[in-house]
Amino acid sequence: MTDIAVVQPAIKPGEQPDSEPRGYWRTVGDRLLHDRVTLGVAAVLLVIISLAAFAPWAATHDPLQGSVIRRLKPVGTPGYFLGTDETGRDIWSRLVYGGRLSLVCGITPVLLATMIGGMLGLLAGVGGRLLNTLIMRVVDVFYAFPSVLLAIAICGVIGAGIGNTILSLTVVFIAPIVRVTESLTTQIKTRDFVEAARASAAPLFAIIRHQILPSVLGGILVYATSLVSISIILSAGLSFLGLGVTPPNPEWGLMLNALRQSIFVNPIVAALPGVAIVITSLCFNLLSDGLRSAMDIKLQT
Amino acid sequence: MTDRALSGGNARDRGGPAQPLLLVRELKKHFPGKGRWLGRREMVQAVDGVSFSLAKGTTLGVVGESGCGKSTTARLLLYLIKPDAGEVIFDGEAVGVPQGLTIRELRVQMQMVFQDSYSSLNPRATIADIVAFGPRTAKHLRRQPARERAERLLEQVGLRPSFFARRYPHELSGGQRQRVNIARALALQPRLLILDEAVSALDKSVEAQILNLLADLRRDLDLTYIFISHDLNVVRHVSDRVVVMYLGRIVEAGSVEDIFRRARHPYTQALLRAMPSMDPDRRTAAPPLIGDPPNPINPPSGCRFRTRCAFAEEVCAQVSPRLDPIDRQHEVACHMMESGAGHSRSHIAAGADG
């Protein structure tokens, strides 16, 4: 091989050398910190979560203590600034306490399902045809039932209670997460860079962790956060049927159901638990959006 | 930029200089095609009995039209696709057999540079992480030594680490990305590099830079190359030996001189006539070959080139020609080159040869 005469280019003068090299996740973190919307949304979520966590301090009244003489007071009543419900209990205190159960029932099943479903989906994606068929056909069986019916059926079999609600919702959410993860994984694994990683004698686990996971995680997280709001609503439905949280315990879904009858008397108060659900799920959706664009490093912020 | 420590020198040479670094025998891969319902499954004969040997420190060029099995052969050699049949012997050790070289051990010694410089780099990893991935996972190097090695390699392929190490692939140009690909391939200190159309997607000036870089690296690191390309001019420039493939088989193999000056197979001759020339008097307007290669699902019987060959006769349809030596290094798979094969021109060839 003789050399071909070429102008040596490679590095232009004036390029500034960078400081300490960073990894992918550090870059994502930096980008998140520069995203105002995501930061704001995260702050709102933090307020909601800490209000629920510190409910005994945040509440102004006993959430269970009702009174016949001050039923369905409107928003802005002195002492009851968000009004009272149909048995005269303070809405603000009930919302704050209700956030505890609602957030636990909304987030825990999604978290658990994302971990289990994500693992199964990755396995189905990178595994052979047999493993893939096995996992995906079982998932199809779960898909055959409407999610509400499936949750009711599971809860009906194993009994009522918060733990069982979480368990049944987890089972309901595993199937869609497996499907999303599997399709993302099969897309990524045929790409050249995964083949290049295979060619570099790396063990399968390292390829999954360093090459496949960062590429599919964004999609899974976005999908999972969209499930949080569904999870809150489903757990409210289970409570309504007497399979989840039982009255008089405060829970957003239960409150919504109870106040339904008062919608013509005091519509604003009746809508407040719904507003809490909407704000919380909106925050989760916006957070996932921010996370996704931060993970898509090709987009300039 | 010589770095003997990186290359390992000749310390890993097991079989001695006479032992070919790579010996491939009857490599075969038939992919299942679109199966007919309740029928025999059709097989795409992507690679059908490829054999060659590769001497240490040389470059083997592999040429042929698209779809002739060049890239499949490359992937088979690395066991990225499992071959249906055949043997790969790396420096005297059979691969994938008991007591032989494991596929992982093979991959440490044999690396590949892919054609598409962008899709072969993880878009979510920094350049340094991409290059350090192999050493970290396959050689279990810790973060810091792996990073140092990555930076040394980037330096070696002409990318300043202080500027490029923390960049992402989409921030680089095509030529820079291909340099990263080369650095990644070198990260495990391989002895054999498969370059699968490694410069085909680059424009001419960048292509020349990369070719010079490859030449430097081969010299400095005692590398052996398999250079796959459809660009005959480039293959002629870089190769010591050349094999010509057609529809999953080798039709002619020989030194660069054998192939480019004394081509014997009608297909090779046609390829050479199709080569663009810088000399205006030697430019050809008429296409030397008409039509597309036949479908590899149902390749022609006998000689696979017979459907497009000007000299095809009865015997070509019946008997598959063997890849036989006509000279010390020059092998051709054509009935015309084989005396007594039954082709009307075979005596002429045999006479001219002797």
Image (cartoon, rainbow, N blue to C red):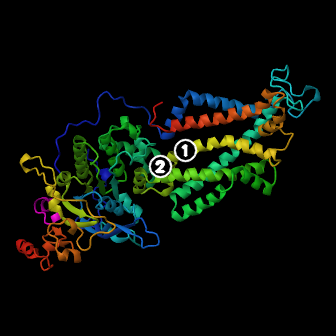
Question: Counting other residues with Cα less than 10 Å from the Cα at mark 2, is it few (<14), some (14-19), or many (20 or more)?
Answer: many
Number of labels in the image equals 2
Q: Earlier in the sequence, mark 1 or mark 2?
A: 2
Type of the residue with mark 2: Gln
- Which residue is denoted by mark 1 in the rendering? A219
Reply above or below: A248 against B94: above
Classify residue B26 as left or right of residue B242: right
Which corner quadrant of the image does residue B257 belong to? Answer: bottom left
Residue B101 position in % (x across, y down): 38, 67
How far from the left and from the top, in percent, is residue B277? 12, 49
User: Quarter of the image holding residue A91?
Assistant: top right
Query: SS at mark 2?
Result: helix
Residue A101: x and y, percent? Answer: 77, 40
* Residue position for label 2: A211
- Front residue of A66 and B226: A66
Q: Amino acid at mark 1?
A: Gly
Mark 1 in CB contact with mark 2 (< 8 angstroms): no
* Magenta span: B256-266
Residue B22 in which image quadrant: bottom left
Image quadrant holding the C terminus of chain B, namely bottom left
Q: Is residue B265 visible?
A: no
Compared with B228, A90 (above or below) is above
Q: Which callout, 1 or 2, points to the residue nearer the camera?
A: 1
Q: Residue, x 25% and y 45% (percent of image)?
A: B210
Q: Residue at x 7, y 72 (%)?
A: B353
Quick check: B259 above or below A244?
below
Tell me the SS state at disc 1: helix
Q: CA distance from mark 1 to mark 2?
A: 15 Å
